Image (cartoon, rainbow, N blue to C red):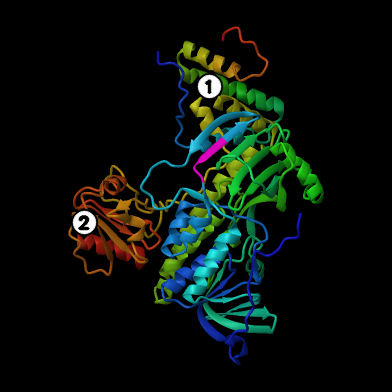
Amino acid sequence: MKPAEPFVRFAYQRHADQARAKPASHPVVIIGAGPVGLTLAIDLKLRGIECVLLDDQDRIGEGSRAICFAKRTLEIWDRFGCAAPMLDKGVRWNVGKVFQGEDLLYQFDLLAEPGHKMPAFINLQQYYAEKFLVDRAQALGVDLRWLNRVIGLQSGVQSTRITIETPDGSYSLDARFVIACDGARSPMRSMLGLEFMGEQFEDQFLIADVRMTADFPVERWFWFDPPFHGGQSCLLHKQPDDVWRIDLQLSPDTDTEHERQPEVVRPRIARMLGHGEFELEWISVYRFQCRRLERFVHGAVIFAGDAAHQVSPFGARGANSGVQDADNLGWKLAAALRGNAGLIESYDQERSQAADENILNSTRATHFIAPRHKAEARFRNAALALARQTEFGKRFVNSGRLSTPTNYADSPLSTKDAAPWSAGPPPGAPIPDAPLGNGYLSEKLGDGFALLHWRASAATAEALRVVDVSDKDEALIARFGLTPGAGYLIRPDRHVAARFQNLRPAALAVALNKAYAA
Amino acid sequence: MTGLETRACFTDPDAAYRAIIEAHRGLTESQSADLNAALVLILANKLVDVAVLGEALVLARGTIKGLRDPHA
């Protein structure tokens, strides 16, 4: 294996803040320029809020890490003007196949319905995603500071002072809000002495990126008990540049250091592929964990992404949920900086619910893939056997439930339906995309609150973007269960705040007040 | 008679599956087998029709490797 080279290296630059006698003051300091920190920085910048984005590294690209980016994530990045290069570079896939031994148990197709601007998933190495996000952040003029490591944090009344170490020595900054997006091993979490609670799984997984030209179809293949890897499970997934991700389950008692040696990994993968015509790009051995902070908001310090919650990778719920954290937080931070701090608590509430859902799903999948006791293994094998013959058996088989945005069903920001609806996303739910006019709904909602309505009078005193649905937008009307005179109040993060079968300005104003002034 | 239902009926199959697994947590193998036996009788009663139970038994026996099923 050739030595790991950084995919991109950035130059450290001394900032004027470092020479100031008195610490410079900034509305927001974000710690960690991974997918979550970059997404949040771009969102804030587009909302006209200056933030500083600090990262303790100066490079991207040690291993592919997150590789599956879901439609919701792509919709968020599309709003920020950086989904196009991701789509160009990424590999689109729709079909997943689940095998047991050499037999295909069943397959699924993600292409459930047409009329969405973004695909269900793309596979893309995290380093590409980060590179495109950095490009966008830099084009927007985000204050990105590489090799800036936070070494101290002190809470004050008006602001939080952070101390930062750089190649030129240390300096301090004051911030109204500090957002910790510093990853699963979050130094910020340690600095605040916060407990990261949850489960560590016993089984270990070997994750390898292999470069080869292969004629496997562009599909997600998952094996239970593959013939080439006795008794354990295996996942194969395509990335751009002829790179394939291979996850191999190892026994709990495996010697990690031994297993990660290329001379041990190579024969395993050669057995799987039936040949040795490949290069090893990256090898890592993991023991997966599902853990979270009890609270994501600690005064002016707010945690997002893996720093706040960690999941096993089955279901692609790590990076995707972190990007949704950023999406949930951006508009609320902007509101707080305009004097409306009440929304921040709803970030904790809504994203806690999402973290619990993601942890639940990824824990269930991990236990199905790696049963913890004999009875669990028996049921797993019975489910696999029944899956060959029955639909209900297939539905029990769990090789990962793929990331979808959370429905904030109990959100304090939502207004309950006044009357039953036959279809459409309920209050708190993420909205689906749909064709609208000659484009898509997702392109027309802007970055604030929006009102989507069909044949309703939109007369309102509120500063809302109004999106008209015409009779021709049949797919949208069906997807939202619209009847003439109906409307949806949609939050900046594209969740439903309220919906009305007979849209009236007074009720709309009350709902908007609940969602925004909470 | 409607026959054995083999379509997926749970809205959240993962939750149902997990509930069964959790019921076995901490049991010995023998206790686990006893639990399964009791559960089978409870659920068999829910089937009402002995012919449907027969279909379920054939389906279940069909998943056991190396078994030559006289009923199949």
Q: Which residue is mark 2?
A: A503
Q: Which mark is residue B42?
A: 1
Residue drawn at point x = 29 percent, y = 46 percent: A475
Q: How far across and how far down the image is residue A267, in percent?
A: 78, 41
Q: How far across and how far down the image is residue A359, in percent?
A: 56, 49
Magenta residues span A93-97
Q: Residues within 10 Å of mark 1 (few under 14, many from 20)?
A: few
Instruction: Give the amino acid at mark 1.
Output: Ile
For mark 1, name the chain: B
Residue drawn at point x = 56 percent, y = 36 percent: A97
Same-chain status of marks 1 and 2? no
- For residue B40, what is the image quadrant? top right
- For residue B66, what is the image quadrant? top right
Q: Is residue B3 left or right of residue A102?
A: left
**Residue in the foreground of this view, choosing between A317 and A83:** A83
Quadrant the N terminus of chain A occupies: bottom right
**Residue in the foreground of this view, choosing between A379 and A389:** A389
Q: Find out whether residue B36 is within the magenta segment.
A: no
**Residue in the foreground of this view, choosing between A506 and A278:** A278
Q: Find out whether residue A94 is within the magenta segment.
A: yes
Residue A157 shows up from this direction: yes
Instruction: Give the amino acid at mark 2.
Output: Leu
Report how far apart the C-alphas of labels 1 and 2 lie in the structure: 51 Å
Vertical comparison of A102 with A430: above or below: above
Q: How far across and how far down the image is residue A19, in percent?
A: 62, 90
Vertical comparison of B18 with A52: above or below: above
For mark 2, name the chain: A
Residue drawn at point x = 35 percent, y = 60 percent: A443
Q: Secondary structure at mark 1?
A: helix
- For residue A442, what is the image quadrant? bottom left
